Image: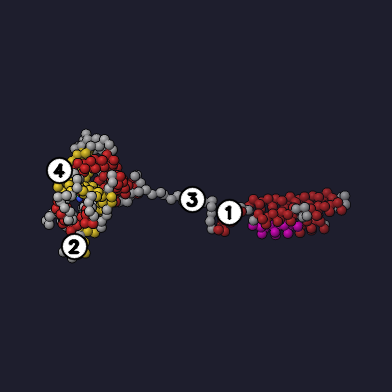
């Protein structure tokens, strides 16, 4: 039958074309070509009226079967085309893959405490001065009134460097404290001034409360009328701002070569409020810094008129403050870089 051949041709042409289709745009062309008003199938259907009455039903059946068959293939193809997927694969970028989460870091507890300490003194009107980590014996010891035979100069405490300082006839060293910045600053400035000096310091020492590298903040205030009362006010103010208004301070006589008189400052234990506990070794007090009135020898070393100028100095260890604040009992935890520890702050 001529009709059957025609329908087979249409079927063949349809199958060839739809197999090549990869996107919805091309599929639409197929729809128009094979199911549109001017399509061949419609043409053939229109011709049914020319068939004899006996042939008409069979012709109609063939045409309908073809139509249904092509429609089914068409719908399947449509479902199979996932436009997005195809385009994304071509771009080698799959927006449907869920994203990687980047862990958000946090400041190191020592950085946090250092910033807090610095900010408290800045608010009290202190400027910031800095000095080098590699120092000469002169700035680290001699100018600060350390006697030649002072034990702090010992190999056991100080990291001496291979580099030799010809001016001092001694090796350079890693500064053991931030106090040499006092000398450097006073050499360059005239009083009155009040500064703090934050930075890293180094000592050949390592156990639960000592680290070969740690941090200090030094303080220095020089002027004509600066007294021990000013020192007391500043340090008590600092303790209250850092640890709370209820914390008490205690000034104990002590010794440092560069201050006279010298004190060590304790604060009432933050854990037991002074009743006595394991942290404060049952004393009720925690030692947090050293201080004093700047020694006249030091003022002389920088050429100040000791009849006019006087002042106070103090120095504190940041790790010590952080250990008290966060109740950390081993200083080494700060430097082991264990993310489980560092994430807690
Ligand atoms: N430099 C001292 C140390 O490292 C700390 C210190 C104590 C600094 C008393 C001072 C001070 O300025 O007056 O242990």
* Residue interval drawn in magenta: 10-22
Of the image marks 2 and 4, the number of the one nearer the N terminus: 2
Q: In the picture, residue 301 is in which quadrant?
A: bottom left
The reply to whether the C-beta atoms of the residues labelled 2 and 3 are less than 8 Å apart is no
Residue wearing tag 2:
171
Could one spot residue 68 in this view of the protein?
A: yes
Q: Look at the numbered disc 3 and say if its residue's Cβ is closer than 8 Å to ligand 1.
A: no
Counting from the top left corner in percent of width and height, residue 203 is at 21, 54
Q: What's the CA distance linking mark 3 and mark 4?
A: 61 Å
Counting from the top left corner in percent of width and height, residue 30 is at 71, 56
- Report if residue 12 lies within the magenta region: yes
Q: Nearer the viewer, residue 106 or 218?
A: 218
Residue wearing tag 3:
99
Question: Of tags 2 and 3, which is closer to the observer?
Answer: 2
Residue wearing tag 1:
85
Question: Of tags 1 and 3, which is closer to the observer?
Answer: 3
Q: What's the CA distance linking mark 2 and mark 3?
A: 55 Å
Residue drawn at the location 54% of the way across and 51% of the way down? 96
Q: Look at the numbered disc 2 and say if its residue's Cβ is closer than 8 Å to ligand 1.
A: no
Circle 2 crowding by C-alpha within 10 Å: few under 14, some 14–19, many from 20: some
Q: What's the CA distance linking mark 1 and mark 2?
A: 70 Å
Counting from the top left corner in percent of width and height, residue 206 is at 22, 51
Report whether 262 appears left or right of 107.
left
Q: Look at the numbered disc 4 and say if its residue's Cβ is closer than 8 Å to ligand 1.
A: no
Q: What's the CA distance linking mark 4 and mark 1?
A: 78 Å
């Amino acid at each position: 039958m001529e009709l059957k051949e025609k329908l087979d041709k249409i079927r063949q042409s349809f199958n060839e074309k739809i197999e090549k289709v990869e996107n919805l745009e091309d599929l639409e062309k197929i729809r128009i070509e094979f199911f549109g008003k001017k399509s061949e199938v419609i043409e053939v259907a229109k011709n049914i009226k020319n068939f004899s009455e006996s042939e008409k039903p069979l012709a109609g059946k063939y045409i309908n079967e073809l139509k249904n068959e092509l429609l089914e293939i068409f719908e399947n193809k449509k479902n199979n085309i996932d436009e997005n997927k195809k385009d994304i694969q071509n771009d080698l970028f799959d927006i449907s893959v869920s994203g990687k989460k980047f862990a958000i870091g946090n400041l190191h507890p020592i950085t946090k405490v250092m910033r807090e300490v610095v900010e408290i003194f800045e608010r009290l009107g202190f400027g910031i001065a800095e000095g080098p980590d590699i120092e000469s014996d002169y700035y680290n010891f001699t100018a600060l009134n350390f006697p030649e035979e002072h034990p702090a100069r010992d190999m056991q405490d100080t990291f001496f460097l291979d580099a030799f300082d010809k001016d001092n006839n001694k090796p350079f060293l890693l500064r053991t404290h931030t106090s040499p910045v006092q000398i450097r600053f006073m050499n360059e400035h005239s009083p009155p001034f009040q500064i703090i000096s934050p930075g890293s310091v180094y000592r050949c020492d390592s156990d639960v409360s000592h680290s070969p590298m740690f941090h200090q903040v030094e303080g220095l205030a020089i002027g004509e009328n600066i007294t021990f009362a000013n020192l007391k006010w500043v340090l008590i103010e600092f303790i209250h701002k850092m640890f709370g208004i209820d914390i008490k301070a205690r000034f104990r006589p002590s010794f440092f070569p560069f201050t006279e008189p010298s004190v060590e400052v304790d604060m009432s234990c933050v854990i037991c409020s002074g009743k006595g506990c394991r942290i404060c070794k049952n004393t009720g007090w925690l030692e947090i810094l050293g201080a004093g009135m700047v020694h006249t020898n030091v003022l002389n070393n920088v050429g100040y008129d000791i009849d006019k100028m006087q002042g106070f100095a103090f120095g504190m260890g940041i790790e010590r403050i952080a250990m008290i604040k966060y109740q950390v009992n081993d200083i080494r935890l700060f430097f082991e870089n264990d993310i489980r520890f560092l994430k807690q702050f």
